[in-house]
Image (spheres, grey):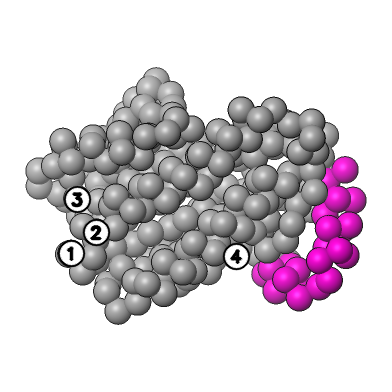
Amino acid sequence: MMQTGNGTALITGATGGLGREFAMLAAADGCDLVLIARSESALAGLRAEIGKKFPVRCYILPCDLSYPGAAQYVFGFVREEGVRVDILINNAGFGDFGPVAESDLARLEQMMQVNMAALVGLTRLLLPSMLAHGYGRILNVASLAAFQPGPLMAVYYASKAFVLSFSEALAFECRGTGVTVTALCPGPTRTGFEKNARAEQSGLFHRLPVQEAAAVAAYGYKRLRRKKLLAVPGARNKLLAFLSPRAPRSLVCRMVFRIQK
């Protein structure tokens, strides 16, 4: 199928928080869209809103990325529609608050599936076409959590460290191909994350500055377009991203624990 404007952007977790902002930014940039989220009604509402503002094609696919095989399902939809994905924004993800020993195992497994496995799966399936055409932009939403261990959210922090490491390695593999990779590493952001992570009681969103989703997404999208590997929005977050890996790990663990407790 013919594409319009600046190619096609596939965005996961598209109906809320950063995902919705990315969809609006890409549409304003002239990109056709493939929007992935769990709620069909929310996707339909977002498509209608975009259609009123921007002359772009917008495909929607309800899909729960916590299920194994979800990436293959999304890829099958893209192939069936005849869409070539030029921009992949792996935004879907969630966290969970509490010590590992008291956490629900099924929820932890779902988190690892969404935050890591689905992200890698979609990247693996869509990357060959980007390489063949000599153009592609991949943005993986990591977190400031990627730079340190996170007691009381251990699996979430570890999953975001995985996303950052994966992005850095993938960027190196893709050098000179026309495909670039950006890792967006925001600090606390007003997206509803804390509610989904059951982290309202955590000090994370009360003791640190919280950024707005629109500002974070705009910064990440700008870094994506500029082909930059790392996107850490905010001067304070940049400082923490620089200092955390250089500080003694035991000290970092104690500090994160005290902030989150």
Q: Earlier in the sequence, mark 3 or mark 1?
A: 3
Q: Amino acid at mark 1?
A: Ala
Which residue is disc 1 drawn over?
Answer: 132
- Give neighbour class at mark 2: few <14, some 14-19, many 20+ (Cα, 10 Å): few
Label ID, residue 232: 4
Q: Are marks 1 and 4 in contact (CB under 8 Å)?
A: no
Q: CA distance from mark 3 to mark 1?
A: 11 Å
Mark nearer the viewer, 3 or 4: 3
Chain part drawn in magenta: 238-261
Q: CA distance from mark 1 to mark 2?
A: 6 Å
Q: Earlier in the sequence, mark 3 or mark 4?
A: 3
Visible in this render: residue 49?
A: no
Q: Is residue 152 left or right of residue 87?
A: right
Q: Earlier in the sequence, mark 1 or mark 4?
A: 1
- Location of residue 131 (image quadrant): bottom left
Visible in this render: residue 228?
A: yes
Q: Amino acid at mark 4?
A: Val
Q: Secondary structure at mark 1?
A: helix
Q: Is residue 109 left or right of residue 27?
A: right
Q: Amino acid at mark 3?
A: Arg
Q: Earlier in the sequence, mark 2 or mark 4?
A: 2
Q: Secondary structure at mark 3?
A: loop
Question: What type of secondary structure mainly makes up the magenta span?
Answer: helix
